[in-house]
Every structure is written in structure tokens, then in C-alpha cells.
Amino acid sequence: MAHNNTQPRYHNVEALRAAFPVTKHCTYLNHAAVAPLPNPVRAAMSKFITDRGAMFGRERRYETISDDLRGVLAWLINGTPEEIALVQNTSEGLNIVANGLPLQAGDNVIFCDMEFPSNVYPWMNLQRKGVKTRCIPHDGGGLTVEALERHADEHTRVVTVSAVQFLTGFKSDLPALGTWCQEHEAYFVVDGIQALGVAPVDVQACQIDFLSCGGPKWLMGPKGQGFIYCREELLDEILTPFAGCVSVAGWENWRDYNLTFLPDARRFELGSANTIGQIGLLAAVRFLMEVGIPSIEQWTLQLTDLLIAILKQHNYAIASNLNPKRRAAIVSFSAPGDVDKVFQKLTDAKVVVSRREQYIRISPHCYNTEEEIVRVGKVLGDVHQ
């Protein structure tokens, strides 16, 4: 499959809205938390449930689902299917990487203080082996090369970062970070869950060694299905921390107990597949492929441009980095006075957003409209009256 994930297309938002029944009930702006399932995803999963109930003769049509999903996920990030393993979620993927890397006592792992816990605890858990973690102060909302230069040393073996930070929406400069890691012989690990589906990520151009991502946010897939990417050249360098019946070669020979791992990333898959989750994520990624990731990014940045202008007009303090190069589809802000009051006003107006720490976080997707953002602005303006 040719990789064509860079050019924006015409964005027909009205046509897209027909695929999201949630638009009939509320203004949903909470995709950084969990996304509603588009109609094609729901239909694909429902069909599997029907076929699973009938059983006889119908399960064969799903035999290639895992391979198909690895294929579209590889397309999404410009990798290869052999570099993709299907896992439950971001946390599982990061734990596989953290426990598989050949780290020794005295090595250190760097992340910044804006990371989501999924990209912190797997590394902290290595402290029992003598591996050190360095949680460094964020630089403008995320991790930068300048911050690495200040805090890394000759024992830094891993740099781990979110492609987009969950709280601030800071869009990491992945190419620059990847170059730094290559130059300093450090593994470059990326949590992709707040980027994939709303912003292009190219693992080759960014020199990413490992990437982990779950499906239920911007990818708009079901919970419980995600994937990890492992750069092909590193497959034999990373240990396989867990072994299962489908992670070895010749597993169909049930009692030939030969622990020879598969030659590709499937070695990280352990047992029976989450077939309904894979079907849902496959349908979701295909849906996004039709829309076009660059078009989604362009549209959501247009929406957040409007939101930022409204927030400034009403004197809300914006926590997100306003540098156009460092922005994504997440905008967080604090309110003068009572944040809970503002959040409740939005909830009462059937506007679905998140409360994160002292901030309100708004995260639109491809089917949201400028009219919805203006509606949010009216609620925010009314709070001050």
C-alpha cells in the first residue's frame, strides 16, 4: 500500500457528521479522552457479533483481520506490517518496550513532567533493576531538544515522549528529538495516542525506534485494542519479555515446545486476539484514511484557531502553547474564578469537554464545526455576565 498521508483534501464536514449520531444529542469536544464510534465502526463490530452468533462457516471471513489491521496501521505511520504488533492499549505496549530494552543499572530514562502516567510508570518500574528515571521540567508545555541538552548525560539510554501532550496539546518536534537520540545513541520511544488520527506521524522521517498507541481517542476505535511499532533493525536487540502460544514460530504444532520467537513484531503478541476490537479499529482507520489525516489536522487547527480567539476575547488564560508549530487539536485553559462553575455551565449546555487538573480541555475532531465552537464561546461569555 502506497503511503499517501501528507496532502490535505477537501474537508466535507457536513457529510462527515452523518456518521456520528452523537451530533444529534450534544456538542462533543472530548476526543482527547475517548471518541464516539463512527457508524462504519459500529456496523463492522455489530456484523461480527451477528456472525459470531451464527458461528458455522462465518468465522473464516475474519481470518485475515489481524494481518489487515497491521497493514493499515503500518500505512498510518509509514512503517511496515512486520514492525507492528497488536496489543490492548498504550500502557501494554510501553511496558513491553520498557521491559524488553537491554538497560542496565546506572542507565537513565528521560521524560518531562507533562507526560501521561502511561508513559511514566513503566519506566519508573525499572528502578528495581537500578535503572534511573529523570523527570525533567517541561519547556513550553513539552519536551524539547534544548531541555535534553540541559539534563541528559552519557548514561541516558532512553528518551520517551508523547507525540502530543495530553494536557497542554503541545506537539513535540519529533524529527528534532529523533535526530538527537540517533546522535546520542539513545532509544527514541513515542506515545502516539494523542496524535494518531488527527496529525501525521512518520516513524521513518522522525527516526522513531518504538511507538505505542491505543485506539479509543483520535483513532476513534474501541477500547482494548492498540498496537506497538518496533523498528525492524531493533527486533533482535529488544528482548521478548513475555511468551505466548502465538508469539513463537510453528505454534500450530501444539506439543512441539520450541521457544523460537517469530521473526517480526508478532513475537510480542501472546494469545487469542481481541477480534471484535481489531475489527473496530480496522474500520476506524479505514474511515480516517478516506477522510485524510492531513485534512483532519488542517480542519481541527482551524477550529482551535477560532477557539483560541474566543478564549482571548473573554480573558481566559490559555495553558496551551500558541506557537503554530507546537500546536495540535487540544486547547486547555483556566477560568477566572471558579473552574468548576465554567465546567458545569458547559455540561448544562450539553457541551462535552474534560476537566484536567485546574484546566478545562477542549479537543475537536474532523466532524466538529465552527458553529459548535462559536456555541462554546457563547457559553464561556455568558459565565462572566
Image (tube, rainbow, N blue to C red):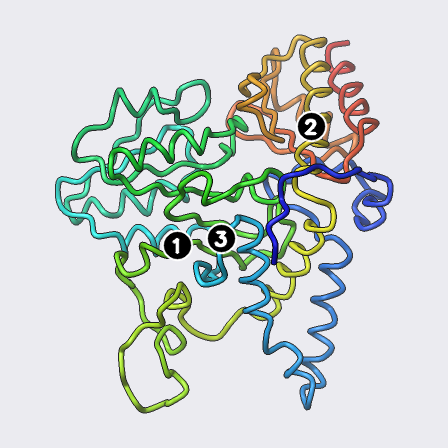
Q: Amino acid at mark 3?
A: Gly
Q: Nearer the viewer, mark 1 or mark 2?
A: 1
Q: Which of 226/343 is in front?
A: 226
Is 247 left or right of 354, judged from the image as shown? left
Q: Amino acid at mark 1?
A: Cys
For marks 2 and 3, the one nearer the N-term is: 3
Residue 353: x and y in percent read: 66, 33
Q: Is residue 195 above or below residue 57?
A: above
Mark 1 and mark 2 in contact? Answer it, CB < 8 Å.
Answer: no
**Disc 1 target residue:** 230
**Disc 3 target residue:** 79
Residue shown at the point (38%, 53%) measured from the top left: 231
Placement of the N terminus among the 4 image quadrants: bottom right
Mark 2 neighbour density, 10 Å: few (under 14) some (14–19) many (20 or more): few
Residue shown at the point (61%, 25%) measured from the top left: 331
Query: What whole-number distance in Å separates the C-alpha atoms at marks 2 and 3?
Result: 43 Å
For marks 1 and 2, the one nearer the N-term is: 1
Placement of the C terminus among the 4 image quadrants: top right
Residue 204: x and y in percent read: 45, 44
Residue 367's quadrant in the figure? top right
Dot 1: what SS? strand
Q: Which of 187/382 is in front?
A: 187
Q: Nearer the viewer, mark 2 or mark 3?
A: 3
Mark 2 and mark 3 in contact? Answer it, CB < 8 Å.
Answer: no
Residue shown at the point (35%, 69%) measured from the top left: 263
Is 55 left or right of 208, judged from the image as shown? right
Q: Is residue 78 above or below residue 269?
A: above
**Disc 2 target residue:** 344
Is 66 left or right of 19, judged from the image as shown? left
